[in-house]
Amino acid sequence: MDFDPLVAKATSPEMAELRSRCPVSHTSAGRWFLASYDAVLAATQDVELFHGTMREKGVVVPAEERLLSEIPEPRHGQVRRIINSAIAAHRLRTIEPMCRRLCEELLDDLRARDGVVDLYPAYISPVPNNVIAHLLGAPPQDYPLWAKWSDEVLEGTYPTLNRTDRGEGFAGAHPEFCAYIDAIVADRRANPRDDFPTRMLDRELDGRPLTDLEARTQLLFLFVAGNATTRHLFSSIMHRLAADPELFATLRADRSLVPAMVEECLRLDPPVRVLFREASADAEWRGHEIAHGDKVDFGLESANRDEGRFECPHDLRLDRPEPKAHLAFGGGPHVCPGATLARMEARVAVETLLDKVVSMHIPAGEELEGSTVWWIGGGPEHLPVVIEWATAAEPVG
Amino acid sequence: MRVDVDFDSCESNALCAAVAPDVFELDDADQLHLVQDSPPERTWPEVEEAARACPKRAITLTAD
């Protein structure tokens, strides 16, 4: 069978060879694959040539229904400014305490249970889901609905085909989720308040506010993009902590290492393994003739394991000189707008865990498996652990 | 060191403010402000990281 870098493991000798000898390759699947750190970084800067899209060839999405990642410049930047007003660093001051309370409550609930507990449904999933649902204006009783819809979208064909068996576009493919978002938009138009959906509807682009359809599309995008990705990051972190008692103890003794732990998990287990792009024109790029419409895949996972960029790339090291140099969030003008939010959530979730837990381990004989969606990375999708809880009086960190 | 920002290309990503909050600040309207354009030497490592982190490469640093 022909070698396909999209499915090969980033740690394999074949991928190491691809990174060093053939960083830009035309694959057996008829797509381009960028394997090296240098090539991926350069390509993320070239947003004129490489347009973001997960859609299959020939799938046309109306302008108002293009997700932020699919909108070409300069409009991408304008819409992005509005998105930033929800989730950029300066908007997180009120979100961090909410996130910390949520983490504390979830762990306190878990503490009441004996024996083996699965951290995945109890801690890993609800934190990112509830934080982003809160940001987008959903009331707490509806958070579980959002979690279900988010998985349905990612596991279905809407992201690639713009349709499912149920119908065309988001409205046809996921009618219940769509109706829920439309109701938020209609409510904030009628009853503006101090929240992100209201701010989003207030802002003007090219002299007009977003249409209802544009607002729906970007709320959907933010929710789906900000939920599963962060969950898979959490899963990677919690899995590595549970599997390595020494690492757990090191972090528990020195909380200043938590941000470096988050960055190393992003580097080693990027929640998005591959970014999907399409060439917007015929072009010669790094000595290769790329044709208009060609699919170009940016190997984020491969780039993060590049031997030419990272010393001992497969080792988790908390003392790397440039901890944020990895490309887990992509790069350039389209770098993930939720990066700061994801980092904050992960840091708070780990800090809260270290406050309340002395140690945890995975019982012998457990088989842990990652996402069935092949381009999704991160950690396993269930994480049974036995927890030794801290007593209230015990000093920590 | 002198800091310049190309405010026309700034998209309020706030990655600079996350790294160097003493130098870069965003207000309630998501507008970036340069708190100081000749920041003290102790802040230079963060300011350099902020310039690298800017998705739009809108931050320019020049030696005095």
Image (cartoon, rainbow, N blue to C red):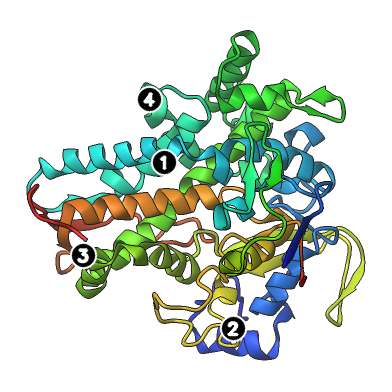
Distance, label 2 to label 1, CA atoms, is: 33 Å
Q: Residues within 10 Å of mark 2 (few under 14, many from 20)?
A: some
Q: Which residue is mark 4?
A: A140
Determine whether the residue tagged by mark 2 lies in a helix, strand or loop.
Answer: loop
* Residue at position x 39%, y 67% in the image: A261
Percent across and percent down for residue A174 are 57, 30
Q: For residue A192, which numbered disc appears in the image?
A: none
Residue A243 appears in the rendering: yes
Determine whether the residue tagged by mark 1 lies in a helix, strand or loop.
Answer: helix
Q: Quadrant of residue A211?
A: top right
Percent across and percent down for residue B39 are 65, 60
Whichever of callouts 3 and 4 sits on the residue coming sooner in the sequence is 4
Q: Which residue is mark 2?
A: A309
Give the chain letter at badge 4.
Answer: A
Distance, label 2 to label 4, CA atoms, is: 44 Å
* Residue at position x 54%, y 21% in the image: A180
Q: Is residue B18 left or right of residue A243?
A: right
Q: Residues within 10 Å of mark 1 (few under 14, many from 20)?
A: some
Do callouts 2 and 1 mark residues in contact (Cβ within 8 Å)? Answer: no
The residue under label 3 is which amino acid type? Glu
Q: For residue A96, which numbered disc appears in the image?
A: 1
Whichever of callouts 2 and 3 sits on the residue coming sooner in the sequence is 2
Whichever of callouts 2 and 1 sits on the residue coming sooner in the sequence is 1
Foreground mark, 3 or 4, reads: 4
The residue under label 4 is which amino acid type? Pro
Q: Residues within 10 Å of mark 3 (few under 14, many from 20)?
A: few
* Residue at position x 61%, y 69% in the image: B41
Distance, label 2 to label 3, CA atoms, is: 34 Å
Q: Indicate whether A39 appears above or below B6.
A: below
Do callouts 1 and 3 mark residues in contact (Cβ within 8 Å)? Answer: no
